[in-house]
């Protein structure tokens, strides 16, 4: 077991870290430790115990100080509620710097999880324990992700319109908690989940059973534009499917967890965690009062959930966005959302109206939604040198796709100047495979550079939205109302010198870098993209993509290095593709060496 650092060593480590981050060295220093006491003064000798107590002290300090550092000692800090930052946290002044900093190279974890104890064997190698929370979708044993009980679809499955399925498998009539069972669909670029409602004798053939699906999600998944679900790829979340080591099942009504341990796991000694919170950290400003200058260094954000799919399912449109039920539009027999204003799958760490917010050398892991959301009115923020992995949805989401994103009523709502640099993004989109490594909505002057993005089921970077329909004058589809006279804010974004490989591992119709809509001044430059299985796989300018420069990229070992699907309205002519290295092997040394995180990250 690691020994905790003594107070003198802690102070020295934080001082070194502050210098390394080029952060202010003067000001107020507060300290939090797992062995602390919230009744204390928050010094290294008498630290606080909780982050919420330290935050309250930091709020008091910014009234008279321009720099406040909250040092957080190594260990796991269980959050009983989200850590919410508001204008008061920066003294409502743009010149304040507030830093939350973990000890470098020592694990400092902000966790929304709860420990599972009281395991007992119930049959064969199946163990059970009481659940500390009412519901969850992720489960971890010694930080290793468990698998929700899953299996093949019932025998003789037949699709019955938009209502459900007929099956010749009589066994499912005896399954418990039928309305918690999910059919899962992998369809081209989407991964949808639709829940069962009831199982009953089939009206037309009494020898078979009818699986009625939960509505309206199933009908929406069957009729949405793009691609629709038909036959599921597998079925998930039934106790009767629990048959492999590493699989778990939550009997929700009984609040009991069942698990088959892996060979190396001893549940009497293992740390078993389930997530309880759906938000770990939220920066919550307003256009009039943004939250400014809050920074997070050397911290791990872990163990959060997202339960909406357990309530209504997940009818994926693209990139884990869903059609908005309040804005549905039927077009050519299919359903979409007015002006493509779909609903984003939320992040477990959320920034709204934040300015100068920074995450440096942080880890985002064991998260049940998307990782980090930076949207509505945020600008001049940075995500630098961070590691995103073991995340259910997309890793980083910048901006959104609603009306105030594509045609904002107030310029202060535009998301701009966000930088994602020197990060490692891998093994994400595990539960919602239609997600992406980095998503950019209608954003301006953002930079995604020097990242390594790998091992994803779908695209690496996705930039833009709307398929051209929200651009000035509209797009190639039937108009959803009067076309907009003004362009969207989307443009001036730079996607450069990233190493993107082994993405598109399970889905299709995406790429290492994928774009939609007009993006004047956007540049895709110097990226090394390779070994992507699904097509096209390389750089993909999809519908409406316009005014984009593509230069100096090395793309190889993908189905198609450069793919255009933006020929409507001659938008292909607005794009400038030049001086790239497509299917050149070995790729140029200078491109390979400069792509990916820079030295020290």
Image (cartoon, helix red, strand yellow):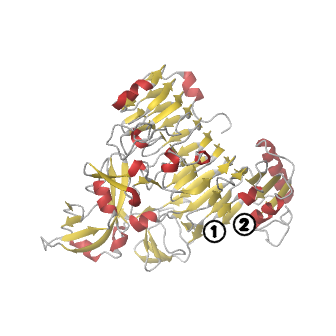
**What residue does disc 1 label?**
81
Name the one closer to the observer, 265 or 319: 319
Characterize the local packing of mark 1: few (<14), some (14-19) or many (20 or more) Cα atoms within 10 angstroms.
some
- Closer to the N terminus: mark 1 or mark 2? 2
User: The C terminus lies in which quarter of the figure?
Assistant: top right
Residue at figure coordinates x 37%, y 49% from the top left: 190
Query: Considering the numbered disc 2 on the image, is that residue within a helix, a strand or a loop?
Result: helix
Residue 436 in view? yes
Residue 93 lies, in percent from the top left, at 77, 52
Query: Is residue 362 placed above or below 121 in the rendered structure?
Result: above
Label 1 secondary element: loop
Which residue is at a point 18% across and 67% down the rendered structure image? 168
| Residue nearer the viewer, 323 or 167 | 323
| Image marks 1 and 2: residues in contact by CB distance under 8 Å | yes
Residue under circle 2?
52
Q: At x 58% / y 70%, what residue is drawn?
A: 114
How far, Cα to Cα, is label 1 from label 2?
Answer: 9 Å
Q: Is residue 20 above or below residue 366?
A: above
**Quick one: label 2, few (<14), some, or many (20+) residues within 10 Å?**
some
The image quarter containing residue 102 is bottom right
The answer to whether residue 437 of the structure is visible from this angle is: no
Q: Nearer the viewer, residue 284 or 49?
A: 284
Where residue 235 sits, quadrant-wise, is: bottom left
Left or right: 160 as drawn, with respect to 494: left
Looking at the image, residue 205 sits to the left or right of residue 411; the answer is left
Q: Is residue 305 above or below residue 225?
A: below
Quadrant of the snapshot with the N terminus: bottom right
Taking the view exactly as shown, the residue that stands out farthest to the bottom is 254
């Amino acid at each position: 077991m690691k020994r905790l650092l003594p107070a003198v060593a802690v102070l020295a480590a934080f001082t070194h870290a502050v210098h390394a981050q080029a952060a202010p060295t003067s000001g107020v220093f507060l300290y939090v430790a797992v062995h602390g006491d919230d009744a204390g003064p928050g010094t290294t000798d008498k630290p606080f115990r909780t982050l919420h107590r330290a935050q309250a002290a930091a709020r008091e300090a910014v009234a008279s100080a321009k720099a406040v550092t909250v040092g957080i000692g190594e260990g796991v800090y269980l959050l009983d509620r989200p850590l919410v930052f508001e204008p008061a946290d920066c003294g409502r002044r743009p010149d304040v710097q507030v830093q939350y900093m973990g000890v470098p190279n020592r694990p400092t974890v902000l966790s929304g999880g709860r420990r599972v104890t009281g395991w007992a064997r119930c049959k064969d190698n199946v163990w059970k324990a009481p659940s500390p929370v009412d519901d969850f979708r992720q489960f971890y044993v010694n930080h290793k992700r468990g698998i929700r009980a899953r299996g093949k679809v019932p025998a003789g499955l037949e699709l019955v319109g938009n209502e459900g399925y007929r099956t010749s498998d009589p066994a499912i009539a005896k399954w418990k908690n039928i309305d918690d069972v999910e059919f899962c669909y992998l369809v081209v670029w989407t991964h949808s989940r639709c829940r069962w409602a009831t199982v009953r004798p089939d009206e037309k053939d009494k020898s078979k059973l009818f699986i009625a699906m939960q509505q309206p999600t199933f009908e929406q998944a069957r009729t949405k534009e793009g691609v629709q679900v038909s036959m599921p790829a597998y079925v998930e979340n039934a106790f009767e499917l629990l048959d492999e080591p590493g699989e778990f099942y939550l009997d929700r009504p009984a609040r009991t967890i069942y698990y088959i341990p892996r060979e190396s796991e001893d549940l009497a000694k293992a740390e078993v965690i389930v997530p309880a919170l759906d938000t770990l950290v939220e920066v919550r400003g307003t256009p009039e009062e943004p939250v400014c200058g809050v920074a997070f260094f050397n911290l791990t954000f872990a163990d959060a959930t997202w339960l909406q799919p357990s309530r209504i399912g997940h009818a994926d449109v693209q990139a884990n966005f869903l059609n908005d039920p309040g804005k549905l539009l039927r077009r050519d027999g299919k359903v979409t959302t007015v002006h493509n204003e779909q609903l984003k799958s939320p992040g477990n760490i959320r920034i709204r109206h934040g300015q100068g917010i920074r995450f440096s050398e942080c880890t985002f892991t064991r998260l049940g939604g998307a990782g980090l959301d930076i949207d509505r009115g945020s600008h001049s923020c940075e995500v630098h040198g961070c590691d995103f992995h073991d995340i259910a949805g997309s890793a980083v989401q910048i901006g959104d796709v609603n009306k105030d994103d594509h045609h904002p009523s107030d310029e202060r709502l535009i998301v701009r100047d966000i930088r994602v640099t020197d990060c490692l993004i891998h093994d994400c989109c595990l539960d919602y495979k239609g997600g992406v490594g980095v998503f950019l909505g209608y954003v301006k002057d953002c930079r995604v550079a020097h990242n390594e993005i790998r091992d994803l089921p779908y695209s690496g970077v996705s930039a833009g939205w709307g398929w051209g329909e929200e651009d000035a004058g509209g797009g190639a589809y039937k108009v959803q109302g009067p076309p907009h006279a003004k362009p969207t804010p989307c443009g001036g974004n730079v996607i450069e010198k990233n190493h993107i490989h082994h993405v598109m591992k399970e889905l299709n119709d995406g790429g290492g870098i994928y774009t939609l809509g007009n993006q004047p001044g956007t540049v895709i430059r110097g990226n090394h993209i390779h070994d992507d299985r699904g097509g096209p796989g390389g750089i993909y300018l999809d519908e409406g993509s316009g005014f984009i420069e593509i230069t100096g990229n090395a793309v190889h070992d993908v189905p198609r290095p450069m793919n255009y699907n933006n020929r409507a309205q001659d938008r292909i002519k607005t794009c400038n593709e030049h001086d790239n290295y497509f299917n050149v092997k070995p790729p140029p040394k200078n491109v390979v060496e400069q792509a990916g995180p820079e030295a020290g990250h």
